[in-house]
Image: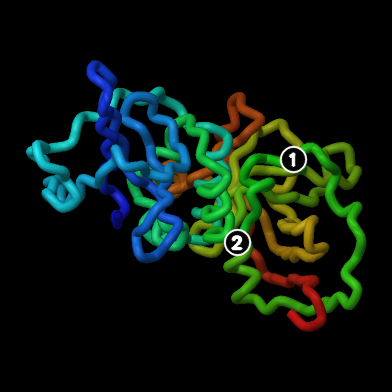
Amino acid sequence: MRAHLGDQLVIERATTGAARRDGEIVGLHHEDGTPPYDVRWSDTDEVTLMFPGPDAHIRHVEHGRTGSSDVPPGQDGSGVEDVPPRASGSGDIGRRVALERRRLRLSREETARRARMSPGYLEYLEERPAGPSVETLTRLADALGSTVAALRGGGMDLPPGQGQALLHPRLRDIDADECRALLDTHGVGRLAVTASDGCPAVMPVNYDVLDDAIVFRTAPASTPAAAAGTEVAFEVDHMDEAMSKGWSVLAVGPASIVTEPDAVRRLIEQAHTTPWAGGEREMWVEIRPVHLTGRRITPADG
């Protein structure tokens, strides 16, 4: 038995009156298409690891039409049954997968290819509540350079930076081009400003990078709004707790309020992030970095 992603696995029950079952093959464990398979069942929308028995056959699907290969006698091979409506709203795992994929600038098609699953199932996983198998999560984690625990949200409540240092760490500077690329992968950074009372403050803000400018929304009376008309520092970082490595980028430059109507309209249309704090935050602030510096910690042989 051999299958391709998107084919249907059909189980015909020999017992009179027993229900026939089918599902879409959304994950392969062997490059030659031999079992086992990850199957999303049409009756439950659940994905399970399946080792087909003698009562199972493959219905090959190509461009929305079915072929007759591996269809036993008496089966007409006509069409695939509709999948029942799915519950709306993505699950936690799907949101984390989508976030990592976008951070790496990977398309769904490329991610699915790396994880040996159908793009349709990856779309389903990102946009609907789903319970993928450990095997599926393992392949996704490998494809995204992550871990199963991270995709499940493990360690989210643990304080960062308390692990042991590498045995032979290497600290190196990051050039400006890599700093810009790393800035563009994140959506939350730390803004260092002098607050209205004259005291220094560091505030987390949701941001975007558009035309080499760091932009964020805030309220006129808020602490981040004090950045307007001053030179500020803006920092982003990423840490790999398991490997005790990571990087940080610091941008320094003048901040100003965006007031020109066309520019504000463009920011509203193109910005991807929204302030997590909610409320009325309609004042746009942009930072034009003059100095970009960064550092990365890796193993000495990495």
* Residue 73 x, y percent position in the rendering: 11, 42
**Residue 31 visible from this viewpoint:** yes
Residue drawn at (31%, 53%), measured in percent from left and top?
Answer: 5
Q: Amino acid at mark 2?
A: Gly
* Residue 214 x, y percent position in the rendering: 60, 56
Colour scheme of the rendered structure = rainbow
Residue drawn at (76%, 58%), measured in percent from left and top?
Answer: 239
In the structure shown, which secondary structural element does the residue marked by tag 1 occupy?
loop
In front of the other: 86 or 211: 86
- Left or right placement of residue 241 versus residue 127 in this view: right
Q: Quadrant of the N terminus?
A: bottom left
Q: Amino acid at mark 1?
A: Met
* Residue 48 in the image: above or below residue 182: above
Q: Please identify the quarter of the rendering in which residue 261 is found.
A: top left
* Residue 204 x, y percent position in the rendering: 73, 43
Residue drawn at (74%, 79%), measured in percent from left and top?
Answer: 302
Label disc, if present, on residue 259 of the rendered structure? none
In front of the other: 224 or 67: 67
- Left or right placement of residue 52 versus residue 184 in this view: left
Separation of disc 2 and disc 1 at Cα? 18 Å
Q: Residue furthest top?
A: 17
Label disc, if present, on residue 156 of the rendered structure? 1
User: Which residue is tagged 2?
Assistant: 145
* Residue 124 in the image: above or below residue 114: above
- Left or right placement of residue 133 versus residue 71 in this view: right
Q: Please identify the quarter of the rendering in which residue 46 is found.
A: top left
